[in-house]
Image (cartoon, coloured by chain):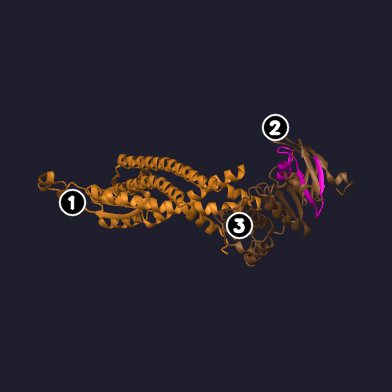
Amino acid sequence: MIRFQHVSKTYPNGVEALRDVSFHIAKGQFVFLTGHSGAGKSSILSLILAEHRPTAGDVRVSGFPVGKLTANQVPRLRRKLGIVFQDFRLLEYRTVEENVAFALEVTGARREGMASRVMRVLTRVGLASKAHVYPKELSGGEQQRVAIARALVNDPPIFIADEPTGNLDERATRGIFQLLQQINGGGTVVVMATHNLALVRDTGYRVLELKGGQVVYDSAQEAGGTA
Amino acid sequence: MRSSTPFREALRTFRRTPLLSALSVASIGFSLFTIGLFALVALNFRHSLQNLAERVEVVAFVLRGTPTETITAASQDVQAFPEVLEVRYVNEEQALSRARQELVEFKDAYRDLEANPLPASLELRLKPEFRDARSAQAVAERLRGFPFVDDVRFGRDWVQRLDRLRNLAALVGLIIGLAFAIVAVVIIGVTIRITVLQRATEIAIMRLVGATNQYIRGPFLLEGALKGVLGGLLAVLMCWVMYAVFRRTASEVASGVVFFGATAIAIGLVFGTLIGLLGSLLSVGRHLKNV
């Protein structure tokens, strides 16, 4: 699903964010991206999202060659991805329901059946009762659930979570993590960048650790792995 | 659940930020108002030039002793000239009586005459589109071809001056009008850009969930067009107020002053809409390129 081959990324300001990074994430995997700030986690995610292009090497996401995408193809790639961020990025003047529907609307999805799709995904994240509430009235954990519902509504094969629990207390963190596990249980690839080593430990999921723009540890290879 | 369409999105912006929206409509309105005011002056200037041009007339004096039938026959030919609106035959007696009426100072001189010194003439009025020096000259040349025509006059200097005035007015109008239009586009672009920046987060989210640039652009273009047309209406209203105030305060000179016709107003509104569209296209395009 996601393949990095000898990828380097140097930003226009000269910062070398990634150096010769290679890994492969297969269908159905749950992968933690760990490392300190500036280690290269964000650069990997932004390459997956096609926000940037690799300086060298090849990035393939769900078959799309990120380095060679035209401006028109970028939205097509993004529709294959569900994305959540630390800061939720909800539209504050839209209700929960409208925020989720928004992701369907921008893809030009048909109007009929939209409401039921939205309700189904809200039920899945446990927020069906708050469909008509505005984000400000929700707790951080609930807001992140809305963001997750929005990311899921298009049934993406890949789910990207950039520090999704960074702003949440421990209880909310556990809830969100369980939700991501359920999503992965349905066969969706989940890539989660996190600082939270307590969360990573003992889960048995694959861990990619970055340092100075390089992969310094890959639990899959340690185990003689599948990657 | 209310689904969003570009139109609803555009309206939503107006509802969410009424002050900013009103402000941008006002600034569009004022910049179109300056154009409108200028256009109004230009319109009235043209109007009075047209009144002047009404007087462009070609007169062919007829040789004494030419039979009336010859002249009548010829005047039909002249009437058939593409430039000619109307031909009037003025015989010697009519010329004399008109001279007595119009030239009051010479009334005595004309009264004591034994023979009528004035020639008969054909007076031609030209169609509006031919009231310029070149056409008048061409018609005059053709009239000289008739054997019974003694002399042709059309006030050459005066017509040429009118021509120059018209060209100058058109040029000045074009330059100032264009300058105002550019200023309007810039102002509208800036106001739309403020809205775009204000909605930068939303645009970023739209892009993340896979919205195409066209989809993102839609509501902004509509918003720009809407503001353009509202600004246009405001400008027409302000122009009308100016016109009314001018008519009231300067009633002696203002009697001939005219206001835009329905077509001109429609053109103005379409123009406002286009400027609004262009302004938002430029500012959204720039933003999308940078994100």
Which badge, 2 or 3, is on the more N-terminal residue?
Answer: 2
Residue under pointer 3: A99
Residue at 71% across, 50% down: A161
The secondary element bearing badge 2 is classed as loop
| Horizontal relation, residue B25 to residue A177: left or right | left
Image position of B163 with respect to A89: above or below: above
Residue A129 percent coordinates (x, y):
61, 64
Amino acid at pointer 3: Asn
Q: Chain of mark 3?
A: A
Picture coordinates of residue A73 (x, y %)? 70, 50
Closest to the observer: B172 or A81?
A: A81
Closest to the camera, between mark 2 and mark 1, is: 2
Label 2 resides on the chain identified as: A
- Residue receiving disc 2: A14
Depth check, front residue: B189 or B265: B189
Task: Tell me, for residue A124, which label it has, or none.
Answer: none
First to last magenta residue range: A21-46
Disc 2 crowd rating (10 Å Cα; few below 14, some 14-19, many 20+) is few
| Quadrant of the rendered image containing residue A57 | top right
The residues tagged by marks 1 and 3 sit, at their Cα atoms, a distance apart of 86 Å
Quadrant where the image shows the C terminus of chain B: top right
- Across and down, in percent, residue A46 comes to 70, 44
The answer to whether one can see residue A69 in this image is yes
Amino acid type, label 2: Gly
Which secondary structure, mark 1?
A: helix
Between residues B99 and B130, which one lies in front from this camera angle? B130
Question: Chain B rendered in what hue?
Answer: orange
Q: According to the image, label 1 marks what residue?
A: B98
Which image quarter: residue B69?
bottom left
Chain bearing tag 1 is B
Quick one: label 1, few (<14), some, or many (20+) residues within 10 Å? few
